Amino acid sequence: MHLPNKQSDELMNLAINLRELIDPLLAQLPPSGADISIAPSQDLLKDQSAADLFLIREGQVEYRLDGKVITYFEEGDLLGLPGPMNLPAGQYSCELPVTLVPYRQADLLAHVNNESGLQKHWSHYLLCTIAFYQHALAQELRAEFQPSAGFLYFRSGETIIQQGARADRVFTLLEGKADAVCDGVKVGEVNAGEIFGALAVFTRQPRMASVVATNDCTVLAVRKDEFIDLIDHQPQICLGLIEEMAAKINQLNNQLLNQHGKSE
């Protein structure tokens, strides 16, 4: 994926991450049919099922909105928005023939739901997809399509999440490393590729711990209402997150108990 105009290094890295996330998602999943060869078209998915996603095997595809090219898709990219993504409906077109590999969304979701590791990949893929599209729209379209997700940057020692603050966003650490700190006590770590800050969104409670960058970090932030909407429409991606959050809660409780025991 790339934009028609110059794009930031962060957005280029996000596009690379998306393609890398696709490989494990589809590795053990058979296509739903034979490869589809499509001649140059202004709406190349018009005759295809809305229940399908398509991996580009050969060629380049343009994503258009109101006739304007927003982004380009290349070999290895996945076409079709999985589930309701709260994005404007656009058209996929191609100036040269393309070859697509079809996959049923329902088969992909069932496949992902069977393995917690894939659930994490899937949730990461959906959040990064939202971010990429919205940044593309923000760069190419009028102001009403400004993104509600965005990239944030933190230097070592800076606070990404403040304990006790209102939980209004969910975060993905794209680059760097951070510590989770509760009442001055380190209770965990956040590594590149991890989603964090989701627990308070689920519980609608203030942040129970701070997250502090331990080196320079690049963070993707997604608004609370968009994350909840994503979960409403794709509930199976919750399983891996819930397991991960439960483990972190147990870790937090144990560390707080140990700290309390030492103070007595």
Image (cartoon, rainbow, N blue to C red):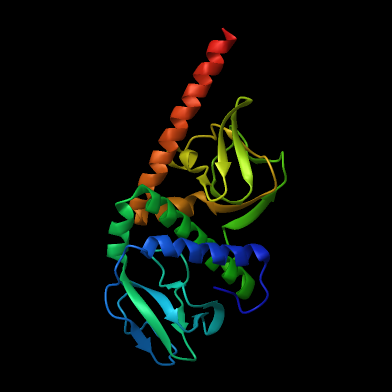
User: Residue 215: horizontal and vertical position, in percent?
Assistant: 69, 44
User: Residue 46: horizontal and vertical position, in percent?
Assistant: 35, 84
Q: Is residue 131 left or right of residue 44?
A: right
User: Residue 67: horizontal and vertical position, in percent?
Assistant: 52, 85
Q: Nearer the viewer, residue 150 or 141?
A: 150
At a point 48% along the width and 43% down the height, the residue shown is 198
Q: Quadrant for residue 185, please give it.
A: top right
Quadrant, the C terminus:
top right
User: Residue 210: horizontal and vertical position, in percent?
Assistant: 60, 34
**Image: 182 above or below 169:** above
At a point 36% along the width and 55% down the height, the residue shown is 234
Residue lying at the far front in this picture: please name it. 28
Residue 155 visible at all: yes
**Image: 74 above or below 201:** below
At a point 52% along the width and 21% down the height, the residue shown is 256
**Image: 210 above or below 40:** above
Q: Nearer the viewer, residue 100 or 198?
A: 100
Residue 129 visible at all: no
Q: Quadrant for residue 32, please give it.
A: bottom left
Quadrant, the N terminus:
bottom right
Q: Nearer the viewer, residue 205 or 79?
A: 79
At a point 63% along the width and 56% down the height, the residue shown is 151
Q: Is residue 21 left or right of residue 142?
A: left
